[in-house]
Image (tube, rainbow, N blue to C red):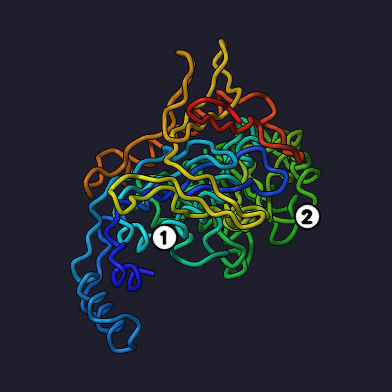
Amino acid sequence: MLQAALHSGAAHRRSVFEAFARRLPDGRGYGVVGGTGRLLEGLEHFRFGPDELNFLATNEIVNDETLAWLADFKFSGDIYGYAEGELYFPSSPILTIESTFAEACILETYVLSVLNHDSAIASAASRMITAAGARPCIEMGSRRTHEESAVAASRAAVIAGFHSTSNLECGLRYGVLTQGTAAHSFTLLHDSEEAAFRAQIGSMGAGTTLLVDTYDVEAAVRKAVAIAGTSLGGVRLDSGDLLAQARDVRALLDSLGNTNTRITVTSDLDEFAIAALAAAPVDSYGVGTSLVTGSGAPTASMVYKLVSREDDNGEFVSVAKAAKNKASVGGRKYAVRRLNARGIATSEAVGIGHRPAGDGNDRPLLEQFVKDGEVLPGWTGPEGVVRATARHTASMAEMPGAAKRLQRGEPVIPTEYEHETATV
């Protein structure tokens, strides 16, 4: 596309591209924007160096004119969008890129790969946090996904409310809290379970969490208490009937005087399994596979469409795809969240070519991330994660009660388009 647009002369037309989701995953009531900070971090280093240019030239993928353009590429436009951690709905203008066609075209795959992955993880994580209530969730899915995806998934989970992660690289890059427990292999390494427990407690202190289901759970709990006493920090259950086991272990711990010893459960948890454990005496959840795979929705199904461009006279015109079942809405979008007098969201209003008219209760949704090619401060690194986490918490607080339901249903609030003279 870039090469042909350079050939026609249209590559340098000012254009507006928009990333959005036509629909939410089946049965979901909302989505969570994830990955914006990572996207911006990558944009600052998005270049075509000698290795990339040589590959393109050697394999005759593009011509010399295109190679020359790529050699000088540095994004110079503006980017707006929903703050990371914000909730989105069908057709929400999640990211808007204003630049030349050439610059925006080159970014398409990068934008969609980051937003689709991280938003899917953040959306699943948000549902798990809702199911967990006040109990903390620990992200433990690194061994179930690609090594870089593991870092991205960990970051997205924390933005959506996870308390901590077992991924140390995420802790290094983004300053999030890291936690973990021993695996069964550690117990199996030693000549006895007691020897394994003594080694862990001797090294980590009595406040550590011991894995107690390698052999017999009751026997393991008794050994743990005998070694650490009432100072034992926690035990982890990773198999079997977690509800029944948690109740039995809690009763046993209490009978031994360990009323403050915590119980963490793991083992293929998702939002539904977490909800089913609401009545169990559980203190925290460790979540892995279901989280890093989006709990049944591994992509947010976002698309990236040209919605407005300059014509031959230099005037902006709206453009839209008209294909059956995949039509898009042309025009640069502006979005606000309608709130009632109690601060509860009632709808998503999207103005086409103008900001929606409203009252003082409307909350503007679009933020500027990039100006003239420069990433604005506050959206990346550890600061960006803290900001996104706060945004998610605030956005969830203004949702109606239906947002907390795990059952299949329609989007929690509707999306309404506003044209210049009418609402449709």
**Which residue does the numbered mark 2 point to in the structure image?**
240
- The front one of 350 and 151 is 350
Residue 408 placement (x, y as % from top left) = 76, 41
Residue at (40% x, 40% y) in the render: 81
**Which residue does the numbered mark 1 point to in the structure image?**
108
Res 300 label = none
Image height of 325 relative to 386, above or below: below
Residue type, numbered disc 2? Gly
Single out the residue that lies furthest toward the front. Answer: 313
Residue at (47% x, 35% y) in the render: 352
Q: Distance of mark 2 from mark 1, alpha carbons?
A: 45 Å
Q: Earlier in the sequence, mark 2 or mark 1?
A: 1
Residue at (56% x, 48% y) in the render: 21
Identify the secondary structure beneath mark 2: loop
Identify the secondary structure beneath mark 1: helix
Residue 358 placement (x, y as % from top left) = 48, 18
Residue 99 placement (x, y as % from top left) = 30, 51
Residue at (61% x, 38% y) in the render: 30
